[in-house]
Image: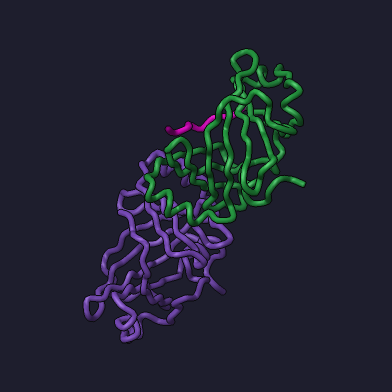
Chain colours: A green, B purple
Amino acid sequence: MTAAPRVEIERKFVLTEPPADLPAGEPIEQGYLAIAPDGVEVRVRRRAGRSTLTVKSGPAHVRVEEELDIDDRRFEALWALTEGRRIAKTRHLVPLERGVTAEVDVYGDALAGLVTAEIEFASTEASAAFIPPDWLGTEVTGDARYANQSLALAGVPG
Amino acid sequence: MTAAPRVEIERKFVLTEPPADLPAGEPIEQGYLAIAPDGVEVRVRRRAGRSTLTVKSGPAHVRVEEELDIDDRRFEALWALTEGRRIAKTRHLVPLERGVTAEVDVYGDALAGLVTAEIEFASTEASAAFIPPDWLGTEVTGDARYANQSLALAGVPG
């Protein structure tokens, strides 16, 4: 699957703890091969038996996200190059009001204790109108320290 | 084509000028998406109508080089992310003694004037026994400043 260049309208939150009634989740392992000073990142990810290599643009560029499928052998070879730049998390999809879904990520390993939620909206109006329930905790939309690439390199913000 | 992990035995030279009888060459454009502090690099390259994305390990790792074919649309999208980290060169294959071939790279754009040659050997013995002809100029084997990733970022060594 290739995401065509587009604008993502997202809000992001840091939860104090996972919600009690969290649906079953899907483990995601991702590691960064390299991150450029301008934010271009290249990562490999394994999720639900599918492995991908993804290149994402940084904030200075028109949004680009290219995802390439890779086989298990290639994943393992590339994974070895991501040591010290890895994230393990379990993603839970939590339905909210008006067809909106929160992707609740419960982090593990070096980031254990961190729980975030990302919500994507169809329009800026829908994003602005959304009133987050209390369990979503603190909003960190736009806070670069919570980008996965920062979490992988720098850990949980102090 | 995937290069299996292996040791490359190479010697590299900086020429003062291209040899007079240089065979026709092949233009190569390559740009670095990102380079990690440990030397892991991710580049895209277009050569002879074929576009690839390649991930190479740095010196700290067991050697890994994984090359993925990408189509024109993907190449263009990714190429846009390599601004300021590009190399253009023309590669000429020059046959030498005993079946050995020199890859003579004549650089263009910001690196115009730079000419290098790389020679790969089948064994350390063959490498040690090779006596470079005068036209190969100065040996720079192992000089990281002449790695393409350094040339792309820092330009011709002063």
Q: Is residue B133 visible?
A: no
Position of the C terminus of chain B by quadrant:
bottom right
Give the overall secondary structure of the magenta segment: loop
Q: Left or right? Give the position of A18 relative to A88.
A: right
Q: Nearer the viewer, residue B26 or B61?
A: B61
Camera sees residue A104: yes
Residue B13: x and y in percent read: 41, 77
Query: Eyeballing the image, is B129 above or below A109?
Result: below
The residue most toward the top is A98
Quadrant position of the N terminus of chain B in the picture: bottom left
Q: Residue A47: within the magenta?
A: no
Residue B119 point in image, percent of width and height: 34, 74
- The residue shown at (33%, 73%) is B120
Q: Against B89, is A15 above or below? A: above
Q: Where does residue B151 sit, x and y in percent of width and height?
A: 51, 65
Residue segment shown in magenta: A1-9
Location of residue A70 by image quarter: top left
Q: Residue A104 occupies which quadrant of the picture?
A: top right
- Left or right of A117, for residue B156: left
